[in-house]
Amino acid sequence: MVTDRDMKLVRWIGRHGAVQTRHLMTRYGMGRTATYRRVHELVACGLVRRHRLLYNDGGLLTTTADGLRCADLEPLKPARVSLAQVPHMLVSATLAAMLEPRLVDTTLLSDREHRAAENAAGQPIASAILGPPHDGRSRLHRPDFALVEADGENVIAIEVELTLKTKARLERILRGYLRNQNVSRIRYYAPTNIGEAVQRAARAVGAERLLELAPLPAAGDSISRGRP
């Protein structure tokens, strides 16, 4: 039997695309045995799919099309999973599981939700505006997350940066964030060397006042560490 709490799990997986069982344990404070039992049930019901990428790795969880429909997430599509995307997906899911329980009057939009929201609005919410409109739409760089306060006044673009972009690319993205008047802050979660490169780029384009740097979350981090 699928419960309301089970549907919260389905919805959270669907919002973030691909996660592991440990992320659900962190996000909802569930025990290991109970979480694995519920995930097994959701897979058996066809609401969640388990992807085995490596032997004995626990796999990745995605929400199926049926699961998205039952969770009222029909604007979203089932996430596609590839080995190249896995490191970024796992760090992003870890970050979301840490941040969300501590948010007050603030909504964390995943990249999937943010894309759908911008498509529905027909205008940027937290994206960097890279150039003038083409075919009626601006060229955008979307962050990995958008933190939006309830009143909509403050929007934080959140980037999870695992690989170093070129100086020109970083400067172009940061200039794009400056063009978006909705964005009040830009927060990069990155290793030290990448954070330093982002800081240099921000200084070069005059975006340093908006920039926040934070360390990447480790797999073992708890929800009590960091800040929203």
Image (cartoon, helix red, strand yellow):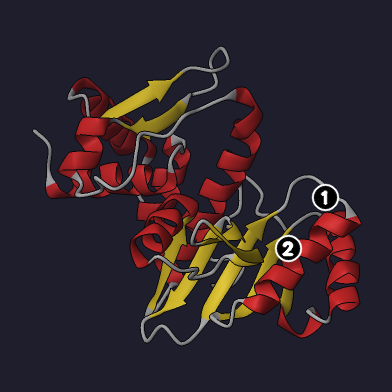
What residue sits right under mark 2 in the picture?
173
- The local secondary structure at tag 2 comes to helix
The answer to which quarter of the image holds residue 206 is: bottom right
Q: In front here: 204 or 131? A: 131
Instruction: Residue at 46%, 40% (x, y): give it.
Output: 22
What quarter of the picture does the C terminus occupy? bottom right
In percent of width and height, residue 215 lies at 73, 61
Q: Residues within 10 Å of mark 1 (few under 14, many from 20)?
A: few
Q: As shown in the figure, which amino acid type bears the numbered disc 1? A: Lys
| Discs 1, 2 touching: Cβ within 8 Å | yes
Instruction: Residue at 61%, 24% (x, y): give it.
Output: 83
Left or right placement of residue 94 versus residue 77 in this view:
right
User: Which label belongs to residue 62?
Assistant: none
Q: Residues within 10 Å of mark 2 (few under 14, many from 20)?
A: many
Above or below residue 22? Residue 150 is below
Instruction: Residue at 60%, 58% (x, y): give it.
Output: 139
In percent of width and height, residue 73 lies at 25, 48
In percent of width and height, residue 203 lies at 88, 77
Q: In front here: 16 or 115? A: 115
Above or below residue 76? Residue 202 is below
- The local secondary structure at tag 1 comes to loop
Instruction: Residue at 46%, 87% (x, y): give it.
Output: 153
What residue sits right under mark 1 in the picture?
165
Above or below residue 186? Residue 3 is above
The answer to which quarter of the image holds residue 157 is: bottom right
